[in-house]
Image (cartoon, rainbow, N blue to C red):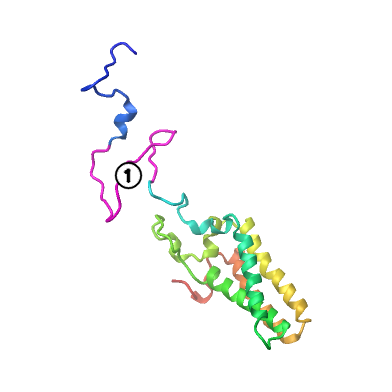
Amino acid sequence: MAVGSRTGPGSECQDPDWATERDPSPRPRARGLTQKTPTTNSGGGSRMNVGTAHSEVNPNTRVMNSRGIWLSYVLAIGLLHVVLLSIPFVSVPVVWTLTNLIHNMGMYIFLHTVKGTPFETPDQGKARLLTHWEQMDYGVQFTASRKFLTITPIVLYFLTSFYTKYDQIHFVLNTVSLMSVLIPKLPQLHGVRIFGINKY
């Protein structure tokens, strides 16, 4: 034991770190939640945000980098195709075209039309005017997730064209559908609203 240190009842802790952790100011409590004592990390001084489920300011930026999300995405396309194949009296070329059209329509709506984020983010509304595609990877272009989401509709387009035997009507429909999801992905159109469509 060090000379001059006191232990026992009535003694005060002389640790300066302990003194800085105490916060006598009252904190607001949410209804039904218990207050947790903030802690410091190993670096010292900075407080953890207790109760936060993720470390991202906006989870939309990293959702396509989650483990297994690419496989789940491909399996969902396959499941859609199998469900369409199970419909009686629908030919295989029509099923392939429907798979391509439904996939591209869903991709266009969820990646290039819907704006904002379903999460409560402390970014002061910066994500409110951005589509999911523009929020991905903090707007950095040509990341692995962006390349994957660009290549997938192209591969599906080639498969659809092959199984429809390059029929003219199917070819036009699938080509227009492909362009509708490829053009908005161009870096030159990042944040651009043509004719002010979907500006607000």
Which residue is found at the position 32% from the left and 41% from the top? 37
Q: Tell me which amino acid carries mark 1.
A: Lys
Q: How many labels does the image show?
A: 1
Residue 177 in sight in this render: no
Relative height, residue 101 to residue 52 (above, below): below
Q: In which quarter of the image is the N terminus?
A: top left
Inspect the magenta stretch and tell me whether residue 32 lies in it.
yes
Nearer to the camera, 135 or 37: 37
Q: Residue 163, percent across and down?
A: 76, 78
Over which residues does the magenta segment extend? 23-49
Relative height, residue 67 to residue 48 (above, below): below
Where is residue 178, by image quadrant? bottom right
Relative height, residue 195 to residue 146 (above, below): below
Inspect the magenta stretch and tell me whether residue 118 lies in it.
no
Crowding near the residue tagged with mark 1, few <14, some 14–19, many ≥20 C-alpha atoms within 10 Å: few
Residue 71 in sight in this render: yes
Residue ID for mark 1:
36
Q: Residue 185, percent across and down?
A: 61, 66
Q: With 180 as the anchor, is 172 left or right in this view?
A: right
Label 1 element class: loop
Residue sticking out furthest to the bottom: 89
Where is residue 182, by image quadrant? bottom right
Which residue is found at the position 38% from the left and 46% from the top? 50
How would you classify the magenta stretch by its main secondary structure?
loop
Q: Quadrant of the C terminus?
A: bottom left
